[in-house]
Amino acid sequence: MGLKIFNKYLIIFIICFFLNPIISNAECSYERQAELSKIASNVQIAYSYENDMGNPVFSVNIINITNDIYVLDNYGNSFKTFESSFNYSKGTTVNFEIYSNDSSCYGEKLLTKYINIPEINQFALTEECEKYPTFKLCQLWLDTSNISYDDFRKSIENYSNKIENENIIYDGKSNNIIYDFMIKNKNTLILVLICILFLIGIFLIKKFR
């Protein structure tokens, strides 16, 4: 009985002895972790903006994804190719978690990167803002989610009326300045006019004599 127990433990020992190198080789070493972390830090993330027939589209581009890693965002999307892209909504913050794809360190989180998708002003794409691009509510990167379209229309109408009134006042002032100048310098202008007519008369007399 004792011999059977001894043989049983001996077999278990031999199995563990041969399995140990395999397990040791499968462990994720510190050096490999450092190498994978460096690879993860090289991942570049940036967004681009396009106006698709009046609809803003934000595309996030991810590059430098090697075979050693893969990327997951906080919406459940996975990225494994060297260069990937995905469209996101305005005004959101997207988290990109980079994991090891190495067999010895598979699934280990290496790094987290973030990108903020800005708000975009829907009013900036309207015909009103094309006409008055300098109006305060026509800035492209402006959060106008708390402003209704009716309020926007009223504001831009007031702005339009103000601009037109300023132009009228400006033109009126210009006319008044000329008129005032002529009144104040009436005698001088008459004298100049007489001199001009006198010179023209002398010129014509000499020419036709």
Image: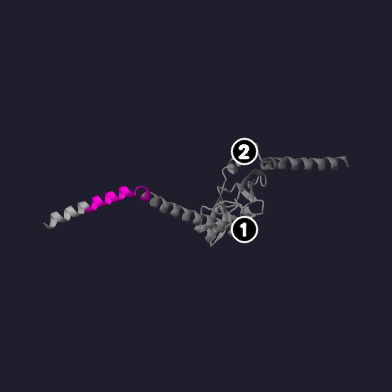
Q: Is residue 208 left or right of residue 144?
A: left
Tag 2 near tag 1, CB within 8 Å = no
> Vertically, is 26 above or below 154?
above
> On residue 151, which mark appears?
1
148, 179: nearer the viewer: 179
16, 112: nearer the viewer: 112
31, 153: nearer the viewer: 153
Rendering colour mode = one colour
Tag 1 secondary structure: helix
Q: Position of residue 190 (x, y in %)?
A: 29, 51
Q: Is residue 209 left or right of residue 78?
A: left
Badge 2 amino acid: Ala
Q: Residue furthest top?
A: 30
Q: Position of residue 74 (x, y in %)?
A: 67, 51
> On residue 34, which mark appears?
2
Q: Position of residue 14 (x, y in %)?
A: 75, 41
Q: Label 2: how many residues lie within 10 Å, few (<14), some (14-19) or many (20+)?
A: few
Q: Magenta stretch: give its range.
A: 182-197
Badge 1 amino acid: Asp
Main secondary structure of the magenta stretch: helix
Q: Residue furthest bottom?
A: 53
Point out the tag, 2 or 1, that comes first from the N-terminus: 2
Q: Label 1: how many residues lie within 10 Å, few (<14), some (14-19) or many (20+)?
A: few
| Residue 187 lies within the magenta run | yes
Q: Quadrant of the C terminus?
A: bottom left
CA gap, disc 2 to disc 1?
56 Å
